[in-house]
Image (spheres, rainbow, N blue to C red):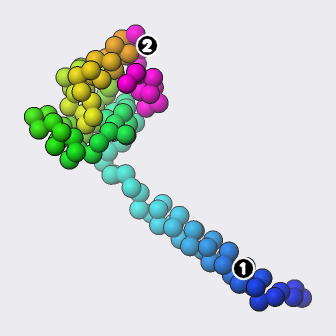
Amino acid sequence: MLALTPDERRVILFFLAANAVGLGLLAYKRSHPSALPGLRPEAAGLAAAADTASAPTPAAARQSRPGKELLTGTIDINTADERTLQRLPGIGLAMARRIAEHRSAEGKFRSPRDLGKVKG
């Protein structure tokens, strides 16, 4: 039989408990997805949220630009004009122009990572 000291037993029990907690959290996360069920960015091309991941929250954006009406859904940045792009949180006139210019020069955005190639 395996002879374990009390400290070794405690370490083994700690790892078993940590593993059980981790598996429980994983099961909970899988059963409660964080994304809203009706919104799928892949269905609309690229999501508006994908290009504003580091942008301020909508409340902060509203405070900084009181006259700007923000979008609440998703847009296809491959077809959106500059005016529509400006309605995204954190996107102003200059950034909207750079996005449109980059799209004209390089072609359509294929993934959210492509937005990182836009200067600014």
Mark 2 surroundings within 10 Å by alpha-carbon count, few (fewer than 14), some (14 through 19), many (20 or more): few
Provide the residue designation for mark 1.
11
Who's the residue at 43% across and 32% down the image? 112
Measured in 3D between alpha carbons, the distance from the residue under mark 1 to the one under mark 2, in whole angstroms, is 56 Å
Disc 1 secondary structure class = helix
Left or right: 93 with respect to 4? left
As drawn, the label of residue 106 is 2
Residue 101 makes an appearance in the image:
yes
Mark 1 surroundings within 10 Å by alpha-carbon count, few (fewer than 14), some (14 through 19), many (20 or more): few
Q: Quadrant of the N terminus?
A: bottom right
Left or right: 38 with respect to 63? right
Say which of marks 1 and 2 sits in front. 1
Q: Quadrant of the C terminus?
A: top left
**Residue 11 higher or lower than 67, as above or below:** below
**Residue 59 higher or lower than 79, as above or below:** below
Q: Amino acid at mark 2?
A: Glu
The quarter of the displayed image where residue 42 is located: top left
| Residue 37 horizontal/vertical position (percent) | 33, 51
**Residue 81 higher or lower than 51, as above or below:** above
| Residue 30 horizontal/vertical position (percent) | 48, 60
Residue range (magenta): 105-120
